[in-house]
Amino acid sequence: MSKKIKVKKRGNELGFQIFMISVRLFGLRGAYGLLYIVCTYYLLFDRAAVKGALAYIEKRFKEEGFFKQYWRVYLLFVSQGKALIDRYAIASGHEGFTMRLKGFDSVKEIVNQSKKGCIFLTSHVGNWQVALSCLKELNKNIYLVMRPEDNVAVKKSLRIDSEEEKKVRIISPEEDFGGIIKMTEKINSGDVVSIMGDRRYGFPALDVDYLGEKAGFPFGAFLIAASLECPIIVLLTAKLSHKEYLIDFNNVIRPKYDGKKEKRQQLKKYVQEYATILNNYAESYPYQVFLFADVWTEVSHNKIIL
Amino acid sequence: MQESEEKRLVEIRNKLKVLLVDHLSLEDVKPEDIKDDEILFGEGLGLDSLDAVEIVVLLQRNFGLEVKDMNKGREIFYSLDTLAKYVAANTEDKSE
């Protein structure tokens, strides 16, 4: 009933430490400087990363030739590197970052008025981890659906499961039933569950339009929300300028079944709503989409045996 | 006594069969096609992890039951029979 998910690991704790020391010695901009060398290495030697990035770049900049697209892959790598450095700088107390919140008051109202919890739908865009400090203000337990062992550094930086931050916990998708029963239990108890919505990792998916082509998006979060009648808050973050981030809570989706027939197909319009939100995001922040997977060619199906 | 318990279990099984067909994405399956000891996930009925959400909800709405313990969940959701026994053991017999 449980399932192992294979994800290639890049970077390690030593690498992160080198960048953190650079931040302390040379400041953020100095640490960013190191990225140009590291990213050149990835561009030349990490075929899988380039292939994953190209899948997105080819859709987002479809009119351009190969060499221009290849250059954009490099810019995407550098942009992701900056996001990672910012994440660890913020987590380790580096000062001077500004977080611009959009829609947070209405989210507080939704969460506090509802007896049930809700789902925060995150994506491989921007820097969702920087929003975690805001989520703690909701005064609810927060459960992140992610594989703990692949995120040791993230876990460390976010102080997940630590004594002082008992409100943030992990639900592993490798647990029995993909962690679904646990997620259901937590939402029913009024807690917040945060799920990644744009990569399926072998889980069931529905075909939706994304960047002009059909892509397979997982629909588990939407099924849980429709079944438990709880809202989905799409959490978007974007780096606006040096040390300035936008955290956008404005998009709320309320999946609902209309009868008992073909329930999974009924969810398609809500998954499409989410894909359209991401589409608009990619238009506004083209170098902050860190999917690194070809979600367009992964054959979608809505049934999987676990 | 044993006879009435068995009768109740049969009723619960039959109700569960109807609910599963009604609520889950089972194609061309009728309640009477489901065996009493049918395995629910993987082989057998072929349900997937997302169907577990629907089962949790239908247990709540139709029997007032909550499945909280993950380890218990694995045993309860193993087959139609284990699910029916869980419902029988955790709900009152209204016929008495």
Image (cartoon, coloured by chain):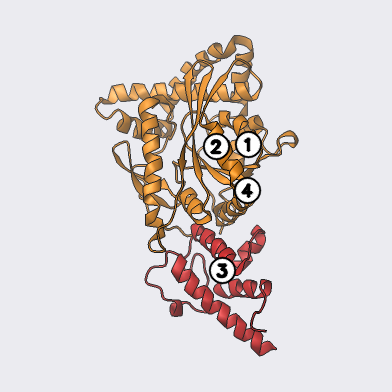
A153 vs A37: above or below: below
The kind of secondary structure element at disc 3 is helix
Asked if residue B65 is positioned above or below residue A12 in the image, the reply reads below
Please name the residue that numbered disc 3 is placed on.
B62
Amino acid at the residue labelled 3: Asn
Q: Is residue A113 visible?
A: yes
Report the side of A70 relative to A105 (left or right): left
Image: A22 above or below A298: above
Secondary structure under the numbered disc 1 in the rendered image:
loop
Residues tagged 1 and 4 counted as in contact (Cβ below 8 A): no
Q: Write down the colour of chain B.
A: red
Pick the residue in front: A20 or A164: A164
Between the residue at mark 2 and the residue at mark 4, the CA separation in whole angstroms equals: 14 Å
Tell me the chain of label 4.
A
Q: Distance of mark 1 from mark 2, alpha carbons?
A: 9 Å
The residue at which mark 2 appears reads as A107
Residue under disc 1 on the same chain as residue under disc 3:
no
Q: Are marks 2 and 3 in contact (CB under 8 Å)?
A: no
The amino acid at mark 1 is Leu
In front of the other: B16 or A61? B16
Q: In the rendered picture, chain A carries what hue?
A: orange
Residue beneath the point at 65% across and 89% down: B3
Query: Mark 2 or mark 4, which has the lower sequence index?
Result: 2
Please check whether the numbered discs 2 and 4 fall on a single chain.
yes
Q: Amino acid at mark 2?
A: Val
Describe the element under mark 2 as helix, strand or loop: helix
Q: Are marks 1 and 2 in contact (CB under 8 Å)?
A: yes
Q: Position of residue A4 (x, y in %)?
A: 54, 50
Q: Quadrant of residue A263?
A: bottom left
Figure disc tally: 4
Q: CA distance from mark 1 to mark 3?
A: 32 Å
Q: Which residue is mark 4?
A: A190
